[in-house]
Image: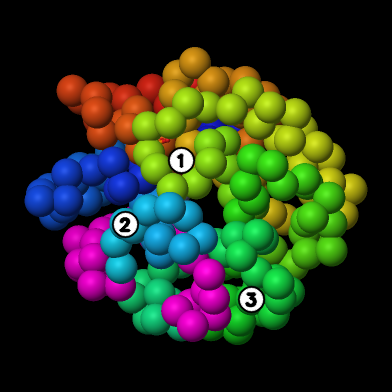
Amino acid sequence: MPTPIIAPSVLASDFANLEREIKMINSSEADWIHIDIMDGVFVPNLSMGLPVVEAIKRHATKPMDVHLMIVHPENYVEAFQKAGAEYISVHVEACPHLHRNIQQIKSLGCKAGVAINPHTSIVELENVIADIDLVCVMSVNPGFGAQKFIEHTYTKVKQLKKLIIESGSKAKIEIDGGVNMQNAKQLLEAGADVLVAGNFVFSASNPIEVIKQLKSI
Ligand code: DX5
Ligand code: ZN
């Protein structure tokens, strides 16, 4: 099993001590910083916006993986690229012109990701899988941290892995929501490459140790 990419989700961090939290990630074995952007329309919650992403960038030494849970992402993609995003993911359910959204992200020099909700079939990705760098498989319904992992995710990851191999795509499989030591190994065995972890990391008394454990599964 290849070593997973670990992406702590700052949604679960202490926003009043964001510099300290980002420095913790910098000094850990984490690979990316996962940043959740919510608009209160596509998902029933608000999170953070561009000024916070810019503030994270001032301290971050690791790539920022920006997960846009917003409608009309085309209006903001360039601003997130300017704010320092390396990966930008948009939701298939929020993008009637998904192909255009992907091309926009790539034209700005960012890596393009597509996120899919728990109810969305892998089939929806067939016509774009060869064009993208990342698939963010939601293993909870997006909008909140600290939710329960949906077990059906394993089946979807296996289906997605098959599609990626058959299509010759280089897309990485990222799992987002409810990831912990109970499900991480099985997710990697199913074909996952990237594990996002919010609550599991930031609610721990020793987040650096938890990241190390996830990294060395
Ligand atoms: C959910 C977000 C996730 C969330 C994961 O809408 O996309 O990235 O922060 O948090 P945990 O790991 O606590 O489920
Ligand atoms: Zn996310």
Residue at 50 percent of width and 46 percent of height: 142
Q: Is residue 62 magenta?
A: yes
Report how far apart the C-alphas of labels 1 and 2 lie in the structure.
17 Å
What residue does disc 2 label? Answer: 47
Q: Earlier in the sequence, mark 1 or mark 3?
A: 3
Q: Locate residue 134, reporting x and y percent.
A: 62, 55
Residue at 73 percent of width and 35 percent of height: 156
Report how far apart the C-alphas of labels 1 and 3 lie in the structure.
23 Å
Q: Locate residue 109, reporting x and y percent.
A: 54, 78
Q: Is residue 140 visible to the viewer in this orientation of the structure?
A: yes
Q: Is residue 90 above or below residue 198?
A: below
Residue 196's disc number: 1
Q: Say few, some or many: other residues with alpha carbon within 10 Å of mark 3 (under 14 / 14 to 19 / 20 or more).
A: many
Q: Locate residue 195, reporting x and y percent.
A: 50, 37
The quadrant holding residue 119 is: top right
Q: Nearer the viewer, mark 1 or mark 2?
A: 2
